[in-house]
Image (spheres, rainbow, N blue to C red):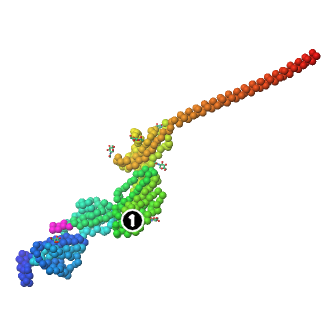
């Protein structure tokens, strides 16, 4: 329109108004108001001069009127509320996209124009989200306003590996969601006349510390393997069905075998039957803990907890590495022998770690580094030996082994006892020989005496006979 026709129109308008007997209405400029779906806004209508008449129109139709009392127009909605204290602002609650448009407030002779723009942030998928999945946030509402986003830590979102901005910033794509992404993200809408921040709650179901987690444990110890969920499942109303399964595999390339499973509902929880060396607890709907007692090398491997809900599943695996020690030969070490101490891990030594044997309070030490899985020491040194796994100066686990010296006095006793025994034997033998010879001698003497006596008797008989013979011959 050229200036001339504008002037003509204005004059015409004033003329028509005067003809109708109305007071000419003066526009007080236009205000822009931004509102978010579901929220409320106040459409301002300030007038310093007191007035007892106000009319609010939406798209040229009367919505609400105040003339001593409230009068509702055809377009009136229950969500409208007119303020009559001090000003005539119109409050709109539970905003909908269809509320957007041009509003006019007429107070006395003045009119206040308000343009309402309604925005909404929508997420796809909506509702709860699963770890490792993607989320797309977009802003709806027609506007040339500029859009920026900030994350749950209130940092401005820029295009990174995990976040992508599209559509001139009106769409934000978050890749590979982690539990740490849970929280309130914000969409900032700004234009010259107005601005608005719309929060969006992101809720990611998943496990804390998803990054590879390894437990290094000494043989025979009790190990607690626990998986902590980011959220209390029972607080998510949309979750009707949750199944928890626990699986194990011994090697990287083998298949997982299920050890147990159970389902969680708001009504009941059926934990699996407790197994001999295993104790299972499910802490109020967010932590699964499995305690293995007296772990052995055969228990080493990967333990995975898998949580299945109707929308998919999330999982976390924990690697259990078992440390063992052995000695060859076992038992006390004699003076000139060596002992070989072997300390083994069920998986290679991690990077920046050392596996070593050391003589406690001594100087002997032997270590092995990343990539290997054992350390061996050959020693004569008795006393307390310790095998430790250290990662960046922190002892992760250790096992003590005491090398005992074979008692040397035992040898001495053997010698002394042996010597004593031989002496006693010798003495006994001499005694026996002595007794034997003595008896022999006595017997011989007795025999001799008996012989002598015999001889004497014989001789005496002989003499008698001779005497008799002589007597007879004398006679
Ligand atoms: C109008 O009054 C209400 C309450 O009396 C107040 O909250 C609001 O800020 C006022 N609006 C303006 C534009 O002054
Ligand atoms: C583990 O326990 C077994 C049997 O209870 C025992 O023979 C072995 O010495 C223990 N190992 C260690 C390193 O304590
Ligand atoms: C869950 O465990 C039960 C035994 O408690 C077993 O019969 C069933 O096959 C398991 N379910 C799955 C899907 O592995
Ligand atoms: C003990 O070890 C040393 C050095 O390794 C070796 O020279 C020696 O022969 C070993 N002794 C025995 C009895 O094995
Ligand atoms: C090592 O030394 C410390 C302090 O010097 C002492 O308390 C400890 O008993 C010693 N250990 C052995 C096995 O000798
Ligand atoms: C280090 O480990 C390798 C194999 O894992 C083994 O052959 C080597 O003897 C170990 N070194 C020591 C010092 O024990
Ligand atoms: C480990 O400890 C030693 C001395 O105890 C120190 O010199 C070294 O800097 C430490 N290393 C790290 C990675 O902390």
Residue at image x 27%, y 62%? 152
- The secondary structure type at the circle numbered 1 is strand
Residue at image x 18%, y 76%? 82
Along the line of sight, the residue nearer the viewer: 260 or 449: 449
Q: Specify the segment rendered in magenta.
A: 190-196
Q: Which residue is mark 1?
A: 308
The answer to whether residue 278 is left or right of residue 43 is: right
Q: Position of residue 69 (x, y in %)?
A: 16, 80
Quarter occupied by residue 236: bottom left
Q: Position of residue 168 (x, y in %)?
A: 22, 65
Q: Position of residue 294 (x, y in %)?
A: 46, 53
Along the line of sight, the residue nearer the viewer: 440 or 369: 440
Quarter occupied by residue 305: bottom left
Quarter occupied by residue 7: bottom left
Quadrant (top left, top right, bottom left, bottom right) of the N terminus: bottom left
Quadrant (top left, top right, bottom left, bottom right) of the C terminus: top right
Farthest residue in the right direction?
A: 475
Q: Is residue 153 magenta?
A: no
């Amino acid at each position: 329109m050229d200036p001339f026709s504008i002037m003509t129109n204005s004059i015409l308008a004033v003329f028509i108004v005067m003809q109708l007997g109305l007071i000419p209405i003066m526009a007080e400029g236009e205000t822009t108001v931004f509102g978010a779906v579901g929220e409320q806004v106040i459409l301002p209508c300030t007038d310093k001069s007191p007035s007892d008449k106000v009319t609010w129109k939406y798209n040229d139709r009367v919505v609400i009127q105040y003339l001593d009392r409230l009068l509702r127009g055809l377009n009136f909605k229950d969500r409208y509320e007119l303020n009559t204290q001090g000003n005539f602002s119109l409050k709109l609650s539970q905003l909908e996209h269809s509320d957007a448009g041009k509003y006019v407030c007429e107070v006395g002779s003045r009119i206040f124009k308000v343009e309402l723009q309604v925005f909404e942030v929508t997420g796809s998928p909506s509702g709860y989200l699963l770890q490792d999945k993607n989320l797309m946030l977009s802003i709806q509402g027609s506007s040339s306003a500029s859009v920026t986003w900030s994350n749950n830590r209130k940092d401005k979102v820029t295009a990174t590996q995990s976040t992508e901005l599209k559509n001139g910033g009106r769409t934000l794509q978050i890749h590979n969601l982690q539990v740490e992404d849970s929280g309130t993200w914000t969409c900032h809408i700004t234009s010259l006349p107005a601005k608005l921040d719309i929060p969006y709650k992101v809720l990611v179901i998943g496990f804390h510390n998803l990054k590879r987690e390894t437990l290094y444990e000494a043989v025979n110890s009790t190990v607690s393997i626990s998986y902590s969920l980011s959220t209390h499942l029972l607080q998510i109303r949309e979750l009707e069905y949750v199944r928890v399964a626990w699986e194990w595999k011994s090697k990287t390339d083998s298949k997982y075998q299920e050890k147990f499973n159970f389902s969680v509902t708001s009504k009941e929880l059926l934990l699996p039957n407790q197994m001999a060396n295993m104790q299972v607890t499910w802490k109020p709907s967010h932590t699964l803990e499995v305690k293995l007692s007296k772990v052995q090398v055969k228990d080493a491997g990967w333990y995975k907890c898998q949580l299945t809900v109707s929308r998919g599943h999330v999982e976390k695996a924990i690697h259990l590495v078992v440390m063992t020690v052995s000695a060859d030969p076992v038992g006390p070490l004699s003076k000139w022998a060596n002992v070989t101490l072997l300390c083994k891990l069920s998986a290679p030594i991690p990077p920046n770690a050392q596996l070593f044997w050391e003589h406690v309070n001594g100087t002997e030490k032997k270590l092995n580094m990343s990539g290997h899985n054992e350390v061996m020491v050959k020693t004569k040194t008795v006393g307390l030996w310790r095998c430790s796994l250290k990662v960046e100066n922190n002892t992760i686990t250790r096992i003590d082994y005491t090398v005992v010296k074979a008692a040397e006095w035992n040898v001495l006793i053997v010698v002394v006892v042996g010597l004593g025994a031989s002496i006693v034997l010798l003495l006994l033998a001499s005694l026996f020989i002595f007794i034997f010879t003595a008896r022999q001698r006595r017997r011989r003497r007795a025999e001799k005496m008996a012989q002598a006596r015999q001889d004497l008797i014989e001789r005496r008989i002989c003499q008698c006979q001779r005497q008799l013979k002589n007597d007879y011959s004398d006679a």
